[in-house]
Amino acid sequence: MNRQRHSFKTLPGDYDTLCRAVWLPRLIRDKVDRAAALAAIEPLWGYEKAMTKDQADWFELVADLIGDYEASTEKKTKPLPVAVRLAGLLEAHAMKAADLGRLLEPSMGSKIVNGTRQLTTTHIRKLARHFALPADYFLEV
């Protein structure tokens, strides 16, 4: 269906006409659907205070559909290994493996940073307290 390009001033003010003349909200399944939905709501960007209730409802629904599509298609990145996260924390706090050993157990600092030893629950508690981070930051996922 060939849709007319609208500006905010020419955009219909009621929900039914928005659906018939601009874009009928539906699941977004691919990049083409996403592009069409973005083009449909573009005239409303920046006019939130001037929108009619129907325009605001339609805008919110289409934006939610776009967000759902983007959330379902974005690549989930795997968290860095704990040893790498810990090395970054040490660097950010100007600490060395020896400092980590003094915090946790002597001789364990370099083994933990090198990934040859796992953190114990006691280590995790101490690290979480020391760096003011949640304990799960130090868990392998």
Image (tube, grey):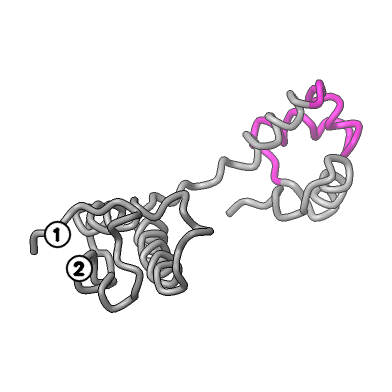
Quarter location, residue 110 = top right
Residue located at (70% from left, 41% from top):
117
Q: Secondary structure at mark 1?
A: loop
Q: Is residue 39 above or below residue 80?
A: below
- Nearer to us in this view, 85 or 62: 62
Quarter location, residue 44 = bottom left
Please state which amino acid type lies under the numbered disc 1.
Answer: Arg
Residue located at (62% from left, 51% from top):
140
Residue that carries the numbered disc 2 in the rendered image? 21
Q: Is residue 30 above or below residue 138?
A: below
Residue located at (81% from left, 26% from top):
93
**In the image, is 91 to the left or to the right of 75?**
right
Q: Secondary structure at mark 2?
A: helix
Let me know if residue 138 is in the magenta part.
no
Which stretch appears magenta? 93-118
| Residue 106 at x, y percent in the picture | 88, 32
In space, the residues marked 1 and 2 are separated at their CA atoms by: 7 Å
Residue that carries the numbered disc 1 in the rendered image? 3
| Residue 11 at x, y percent in the picture | 30, 61
Please state which amino acid type lies under the numbered disc 2.
Answer: Ala
Q: Residue furthest left?
A: 1
| Residue 119 at x, y percent in the picture | 74, 47
Q: Is residue 17 above or below residue 121?
A: below
**In the image, is 70 to the left or to the right of 49?**
left
Q: Mark 1 or mark 2: name the one nearer the start of the chain.
A: 1
- Say which mark, if any, is on residue 116: none
Let me know if residue 94 is in the magenta part.
yes
- Nearer to us in this view, 47 or 62: 47
Query: Is disc 1 in contact with disc 2, using a CB cutoff of under 8 Å?
Result: yes
Quarter of the image where the N terminus is located: bottom left
**In the image, is 33 to the left or to the right of 119?**
left
